[in-house]
Structures are given as structure tokens and as C-alpha cells.
Image: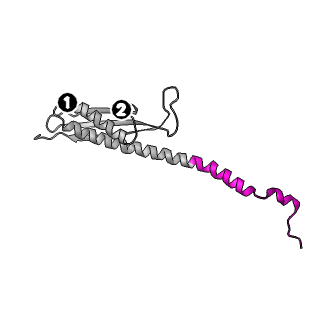
Amino acid sequence: MPTGRGPEDDGERGSAVVEFVFLGVLLLIPVVYLVLTVGQLQAGSFAVVGAADQAAKVYADAPTSAEGEARAREAARIALADFGFAADQSLVEISCSAECLAPGSAVTVAVRLEVPLPLVPAIGGTTPSASTVDATSTQIVERFG
């Protein structure tokens, strides 16, 4: 009894597995890279928010402006390092509403971070950036220190 197969059908045997694997890898790699990039951007967002918040709190609690600036920059560096970012990828700006550390004055810290693309090495000394994220935090200096 004929099975309905001809000699021309034997050449197609097993090709679905090859096509499935090829297309699976072809589609899976960009999706995985997209997930890595979004994760890197999210980590950068969390890092700058934490860095700005901690730097503003540390500065507002410092005894002098010079010591406050040094402490704030160190707090921002540590917060960024917790998320795997180097200090040279960021910019920390500190400003005050009036005289810094005067009772009741506002200390504002802005942190900007260049989030690098994951798994992409530096080219010519510059690292390709996925995006720039930033955050600002304001802390009021205690009135009765």
C-alpha cells in the first residue's frame, strides 16, 4: 500500500529542527541583549537616585562645606559602586539655596550617569553609552543643629 511519500520528500526530512534552532538563536540573542540593556538602565536609574539622596543627606549633616562636599562625593561614589558603576562615568553637582549649611537652607545634589551598553568594550578610549540618567535630591539643613 502506498504511503504517499515520494523520493522528493526525503530531502526535507529533519530540516524543521535546523530551522527551529537557527531562528530560535537568531531571535533569542537580540531579546537577551535587550533584557541586559534594560536591566543596565534600571540599575543606573536606581544608582543615581540612591547616590543623590545619600549625598544630599551627608552634605546637610556635615560640620563644614568643604567636609560636606568631600563626604557627599564619597557617598555618591559608594552608592554608584554598589550598582557596578565607576565614579568617572558620573557627574555630581552640589548647590545650595543660600549659604551652604546655614540653618534652614536647602542643599541640592544632582547626579548624572552615562550608562554604558552591556558587553561592549571601550572604543578609542570612549565607552558607547546606552543612555544618560540623572536624579536630583534636596535636603534641608537642620534649624537647630
Classify residue 137 as left or right of residue 12. Answer: left
Residue under numbered circle 1? 65
Q: Are marks 1 and 2 in contact (CB under 8 Å)?
A: no
Is residue 136 visible to the viewer in this orientation of the structure?
no
Amino acid identity at mark 2:
Leu
Q: What stretch of residues is rendered in magenta?
A: 1-30
Is residue 105 visible to the viewer in this orientation of the structure?
yes
Q: Main secondary structure of the magenta part?
A: helix
Classify residue 8 as left or right of residue 55. Answer: right
Is-magenta flag for residue 13? yes
Which one is in front, 85 or 49?
A: 85
**Is residue 10 placed above or below 35 in the rendered structure?**
below
Residue located at (83% from left, 59% from top): 10
**Is residue 35 placed above or below 65 in the rendered structure?**
below
Residue located at (71% from left, 53% from top): 18
Secondary structure of the residue carrying numbered label 2: strand
Q: Which image quadrant is residue 5 in?
A: bottom right
